[in-house]
Amino acid sequence: VERFPDRTGHNSFLEPEGLNTNIVYPNGMSGPYPPEIQLKIMRTMVGLENVEIIRPGYDVEYDFVNPQSLTHTLETKAISGLFLAGQICGTTGYEEAAAQGIVAGANAGRAAVAANYGNHIGAGSTGAAAPFILGRDEGYIGVLIDDLVTRGTQEPYRMFTSRAEYRISLRADNADLRLTRKGIEYGLVKDEERIAAAEAREMLIDDRVNELSKFKLFVTDWAQRDESGHMGGDAVNRKGREGHKKSAEEVLGMPHVTLSDVESIIHDVQTEERQRALADAEAQLKSSSEEESTEFQVQAPTVMEPSPPSIYDTVEATIKYKSYVTRQHKDMESWRRAQGVRIPPDLVYDHECLPTLSKEELEKLSTIRPATFAEASQISGMTPQSLVFLYHQVMKRNKNRDSQRAAAK
């Protein structure tokens, strides 16, 4: 009511607690009210006029340490050797607490080992004293901790994908490629079978992506062999397209084309090439002398087998998102160079000018009115993508202003 007075409703998802029970959980409802008030709220919903509450909701109020008083290892700046993790850092949620526990626990252990050798864990340290820190581009854990220790938080912090500027790269299918190697490096992963499995999967993915980048066909051949019409269709028959080739990697990057579609065509082409090679070899063998035939070796092309389930999703996603990841990195690089750019003091923060920003972000920008993008990036709750959009809008505004001035002269 106080934060969103313009809204006339609130979404709640009624989730059955099980197959053999009538108990339903109203997901999305807050519980900081007395039980009788909660009952009144529930009965305002259509269909729940006679609902009864089995167990009322509740909220927990707790004290926390300002996370800006911590380093990226989650060690307190004031007390050496004291590491914090969980709600005490201002977060909410089981996963958020567990994520911090991994980093704080790893660094506490490394600090204890380093102390035995008279060292201190910290930036620039090496060996056992090297800090275990995840970057924002390496995992959501890195995003969470960086947000907390650099920006702090004014309300219980929860990890959302929108907070990560590299979320296209931070996928479930490549989590082992991003984090297992890091775990091995810092002694957190020691199981030989797990290490071997991770290395084998990484090698298989690299090999398959490399194979797809090297296999090429004329665009007309791709289109003719494709039954779905997603690999060019009639467009490939345009004048000047006959001699143009595309790699399997490029074709897979097209909308609606799947890895299995591409691999099926590659398999058919290589099978045909292999059959021709074997037929030619057989004909050559028949025409050769007995002495020549004993030394004759057939070198038939190999045929690509389908990607196993263990690498299928990662290979497909790696290629599908390649151009987006490249653009993402360019956006963030231009954003980093723009930290000192000034934001016009008369900029209006509303949905008409900045349609992609949330109401909460617009309210904070209107209240704080940062003078530069460096200041804007320190506002708790501002997502990287919103900051990049704001930067592009300011640059566009400045360009239009300069054009108008030039025209006036």
Image (cartoon, rainbow, N blue to C red):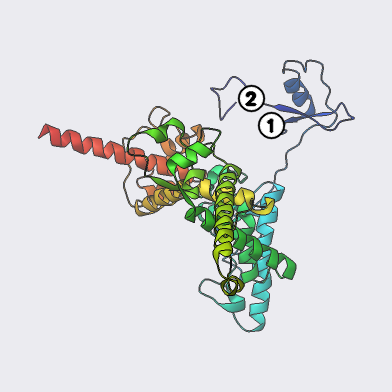
Work out whether residue 384 or residue 305 is closer to the camera in this orientation and state it. 305
Q: Residue at x 72, y 17 (%)?
A: 44
The answer to whether 62 appears left or right of 332 in the picture is right
Q: Tell which of 193 and 51 is nearer to you.
A: 193
Q: Which residue is mark 1?
A: 28
Pointer 1 local density, CA inside 10 Å: few below 14, some 14–19, many at least 20: few
- Give the percent coordinates (x, y) of residue 76: 60, 64
Residue 10: give its label.
2
- Circle 2: residue type: His
Q: Point out residue 232 in the picture as x, y percentages from the top left corner.
A: 46, 36
Q: Quadrant of the N terminus?
A: top right
Q: In the rendered image of this protein, does residue 127 appear above or below residue 365?
A: below
Q: Earlier in the sequence, mark 1 or mark 2?
A: 2
Q: Which amino acid does the dot numbered 1 rest on?
A: Gly
Task: Decide if residue 386 is in sight here.
Answer: no
Left or right of residue 101, residue 361 in this image: left
Check contact, mark 1 vs mark 2: CB within 8 A. Answer: yes
Question: Rounded to the nearest whole Å, what is the CA distance between mark 1 and mark 2?
Answer: 8 Å
